[in-house]
Image: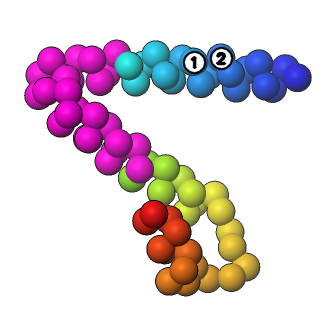
Amino acid sequence: MIAGVLFGLGASACWALANIAVARSSRAVGAARALLWAQLVGIAVLAEAAMALDFRPVPIGGTHVMWMAL
Protein backbone atom coordinates (compact mmCIF):
# COMPACT_ATOMS: atom_id res chain seq x y z
CA MET A 1 0.00 0.00 0.00
CA ILE A 2 2.81 2.40 0.88
CA ALA A 3 4.52 1.62 -2.42
CA GLY A 4 1.38 2.62 -4.32
CA VAL A 5 1.21 5.93 -2.47
CA LEU A 6 4.89 6.62 -3.14
CA PHE A 7 4.53 5.74 -6.82
CA GLY A 8 1.49 8.02 -7.05
CA LEU A 9 3.38 10.90 -5.47
CA GLY A 10 6.35 10.28 -7.75
CA ALA A 11 4.11 10.23 -10.82
CA SER A 12 2.49 13.51 -9.73
CA ALA A 13 5.89 15.13 -9.25
CA CYS A 14 7.07 13.94 -12.68
CA TRP A 15 3.85 15.19 -14.26
CA ALA A 16 4.34 18.62 -12.69
CA LEU A 17 7.96 18.84 -13.85
CA ALA A 18 7.00 17.80 -17.38
CA ASN A 19 4.20 20.38 -17.40
CA ILE A 20 6.63 23.13 -16.39
CA ALA A 21 9.20 22.04 -19.00
CA VAL A 22 6.66 21.89 -21.83
CA ALA A 23 5.10 25.22 -20.82
CA ARG A 24 8.48 26.95 -20.94
CA SER A 25 9.55 25.35 -24.19
CA SER A 26 6.17 26.00 -25.82
CA ARG A 27 6.68 29.72 -25.24
CA ALA A 28 10.08 29.45 -26.91
CA VAL A 29 9.31 27.25 -29.95
CA GLY A 30 5.52 26.85 -30.09
CA ALA A 31 3.16 24.33 -28.53
CA ALA A 32 3.10 21.73 -31.30
CA ARG A 33 6.88 21.58 -31.67
CA ALA A 34 7.42 21.45 -27.89
CA LEU A 35 4.95 18.57 -27.48
CA LEU A 36 6.45 16.69 -30.42
CA TRP A 37 9.97 16.93 -28.98
CA ALA A 38 8.71 15.95 -25.51
CA GLN A 39 7.11 12.83 -26.98
CA LEU A 40 10.19 11.91 -29.03
CA VAL A 41 12.56 12.34 -26.08
CA GLY A 42 10.19 10.36 -23.84
CA ILE A 43 9.97 7.53 -26.34
CA ALA A 44 13.75 7.39 -26.70
CA VAL A 45 14.33 7.33 -22.93
CA LEU A 46 11.66 4.68 -22.34
CA ALA A 47 12.94 2.52 -25.21
CA GLU A 48 16.43 2.52 -23.73
CA ALA A 49 15.09 1.75 -20.25
CA ALA A 50 12.93 -1.07 -21.63
CA MET A 51 15.86 -2.63 -23.47
CA ALA A 52 18.04 -2.40 -20.36
CA LEU A 53 15.45 -3.82 -17.95
CA ASP A 54 13.54 -6.39 -20.02
CA PHE A 55 15.14 -9.75 -20.75
CA ARG A 56 13.13 -11.75 -23.26
CA PRO A 57 13.54 -15.49 -23.81
CA VAL A 58 12.30 -15.07 -27.40
CA PRO A 59 13.86 -12.52 -29.77
CA ILE A 60 11.68 -9.67 -31.00
CA GLY A 61 10.25 -10.44 -34.43
CA GLY A 62 8.47 -8.51 -37.15
CA THR A 63 5.06 -8.94 -35.52
CA HIS A 64 6.33 -7.42 -32.30
CA VAL A 65 7.80 -4.45 -34.13
CA MET A 66 4.53 -3.93 -35.99
CA TRP A 67 2.52 -3.86 -32.73
CA MET A 68 5.02 -1.49 -31.11
CA ALA A 69 4.82 0.87 -34.09
CA LEU A 70 1.04 0.77 -34.02
Expressed as whole percent of the image width and height from the top left, the position of residue 40 reads 32, 47
The stretch in magenta equals 20-43
Question: Any mark on residue 12, and which?
Answer: 1
Q: Where is residue 51 in the image (x, y as percent from the top left)?
A: 55, 63
CA gap, disc 1 to disc 2?
Answer: 5 Å
Asked if residue 31 lies in the magenta stretch, the reply is yes
Amino acid identity at mark 2: Leu
For badge 1, the amino acid type reads Ser
Please name the colour scheme applied to the rendered image.
Answer: rainbow
Residue matched to label 2 = 9
Q: In this view, does 35 lie above or below 47?
A: above
Main SS type for the magenta part? Answer: helix
Q: Residue at image x 81%, y 26%?
A: 3
Which quadrant is the C terminus positioned in?
A: bottom left
Q: In this view, does 69 lie above or below 22?
A: below
**The one of 63 and 42 positioned closer to us in this rendering:** 63
